[in-house]
Image (cartoon, rainbow, N blue to C red):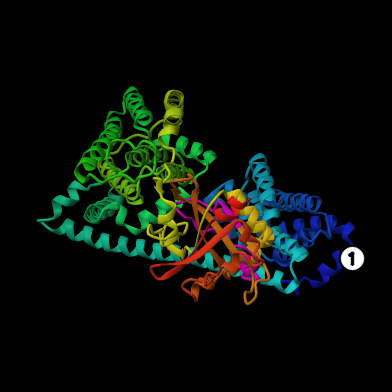
Amino acid sequence: MLSEASPLFQWLNAHPELAGLVTFIISASESVAIIGTIVPGSITMAVIGALAGAGIIPLWSTLLCAIFGAILGDGISYWLGHHFKDRIKSFWPFRHYPGLLESGEVFVHRYGVMSVFVGRFVGPVRALVPLVAGMLGMRPLPFIIANVASAIGWAPAYMLPGILLGAAALELPPDIAMNVMMVFVIVSLLFILGLWLLYKFLKLFHNQIEQLQNWIWSKFKNSRLLSPITRLLKHRDPVKMHGQLNLAFYFLLTMFLFFCLAFYVTAVGPSSVPINNAIYHLFRGIHTHGVDVIMLNITLLGQKEILLPVILVIFVLLLIYRRFRTAFHALALGVMCAGSVYVLKHLLKSPRPWGIFQNPETWSMPSGHTALATTVFMGLAFLIARSVQPKFRKLIYFIGILLSFMVGVSRLYLGAHWFTDVLGSWLLASALLMLVILSYERQTEPREHAASILLVTFFCLLITFTTYHYYYFNRLLINYSQLNYPTHKIAMNNWWQKNDMLAAYNTSLFGFPSYPINIAWTGNIRHIQESLQKEGWIEPPARDVISTLHRIADVQSTEYLSMISPQYLDKRPELILVRRGVPGVKGLVVIRLWESNRVIAQTSSPIWVGMVSIAPRTYSWIFKKHPGELVIDPAFIFPNKMGEGSWEWKIVQDKDQKILLIRENKKIHRKK
């Protein structure tokens, strides 16, 4: 990239005052039809971004010039298309390559006004979409709105890689900065490749299933024994008759998966499922008060006291519109969801996770909030989507899926359910939706009043949500507050003699055994910190852009802490200090201390547990089981032996590892 744009890079470096004008011209040219296919906009914009990130040219004014240039370029293309109309087809190069315009027309017809926004980020049609939009008579106002909005997003997106490279160049040597960019490029390409392969696989799978089901449908239809199935699964549109079989297949598959999941969880217990524990500890470890409030508000979107009145109002509204069949299908969906959740909870009797102040009294599987939210929001999405233009349907379904997903995640974050509870609820709700749709699609129904349903749903949800929030939110905030692990008091002698064993491992963010504990310390944490700082321990390097780039690119990564810190009892370390220049150690030596759930009975002083380790390379976990372990030695803690005046220590054997115990030196204290 840099070699291709080296002349531009050097010229702008020598003439930074002209950067805004050059950026304006390049971004405008890159957006004009035909010219945009010649100008290497992605490379030049990245180069300009690198100069801006390095501070050689002004950032914000350059960014504004790029945005205005992109707006002008698309505007010129739109004007050309609007002015010349179909005569453009006779211009070069379209008269020789008519497929260029045809691809643009297909794109505009498919996405409408959104094609102007989306097309700016899609390389093959980026410069053609505004031209075709003008040819096809798109109204000026919608085009201008989409043009301006897309330019505001396009310019920063194309300049961002260069800005990061330029910013990194200020702090990193050039070879390291290039390494960082290469890692970003490789990761991005792998991510895009993975998405593309997944899309192709799902498309192939869907096509194969479609062909198989067409064959099965024809066999069923011609079979005297099985023909009743085709009558049972009939569709209002004879052309889509096999689609009912498709839906029935997924209904059976979803129910099969749900019952397999329920049987497995019941057999082994939800707390014994590895993914349950991993996600449970993950969310317990990242709790903050602000996010608690947000997640509790989201979880209220699945509260039955809020959603059931919405279902009843929709039912009444449909009756008023004389959509009796639609009304009873909507009511049946809500009743089946609430009833099945109640029955399954009492049949499976799956216990809830431990850890919140007051757990709901009902059983855990399936999650009622998640199931009800999924059926209501996706049912409304289906009802509204069938009554609007096809180009808006994906957006409506996306909103329904997003709300259902967020409610499920909120239940996991709050610690009210296991992951298998939420997964089972999604499966159950999907099955119920497909069952109701199978019944609903048997007869032709007129299109619903989508705007009325949407407005009534919104205002009803707003009223029920606000009312419930006003009366119960503060109480729920207390009920869902996290509990700490029970605290145990132990005698000093028992702990010092190692009769009362500590946990062998601190845990990672996901709750799995990670690095072994090799230090246990009792005393005031501020006194401990002061003593360590006198011995040369310092605060760790700040977590900023530069340290993040080092860790991601694995360049001098041992000089910075890992981006994800290990946890103990689902808590972050209370104290983190580092030391450099330890003999025989490359990089940082790190000490992390957590407050354990044990205190000394005589003094009520907490026992702090932790580990002294070497900051590992970013990807060392691929090659070593426990990177960064140290053979514990008091010299690592007190290299200058200054701690002898306040602390005494001993090394004890715990199972197959050694632990350094440190406590206040009572003899020295008495002398003072």
Residue 452 visible in rendering:
no
Q: Position of residue 136 (x, y in %)?
A: 61, 49
The magenta region covers 551-576
Q: Amino acid at mark 1?
A: Ala
Of all residues shown, which one is farthest toward the front?
Answer: 671
Q: Is residue 256 above or below residue 113?
A: below
Circle 1 packing at 10 Å, graded few (<14), some (14-19), many (20+), is few
The answer to whether 213 appears left or right of 1 in the picture is: left
Q: Nearer the viewer, residue 226 or 167?
A: 167
How many labels were placed on the picture? 1
Q: Is residue 268 above or below residue 388?
A: below
Q: Quadrant of the N terminus?
A: bottom right
171 in magenta: no
Q: Is residue 89 left or right of residue 314?
A: right
Residue at figure coordinates x 64%, y 70% from the top left = 587
Predominant SS of the magenta segment: loop
**Image location (x, y in percent) of residue 269:** 26, 53
- Report x, y in % for residue 618: 57, 69
Q: Relative to 395, is 120 above or below?
A: below
The local secondary structure at tag 1 comes to helix
Residue appearing at x 41%, y 30% in the figure? 449
Residue found at the very far left of the displayed protein = 225
Q: Position of residue 348 (x, y in %)?
A: 21, 46
Left/right of residue 163 with respect to residue 594 in the rendered view: right
Whether residue 9 can be seen here? yes
Whether 555 is among the magenta residues is: yes
Residue at horizontal 41 percent and vertical 61 percent from the top:
498
Tell me the residue that label 1 is attached to. 14
Given residues 180 and 335, the one toward you in this image is 180
For this rendering, which residue is in front, 238 or 540?
540
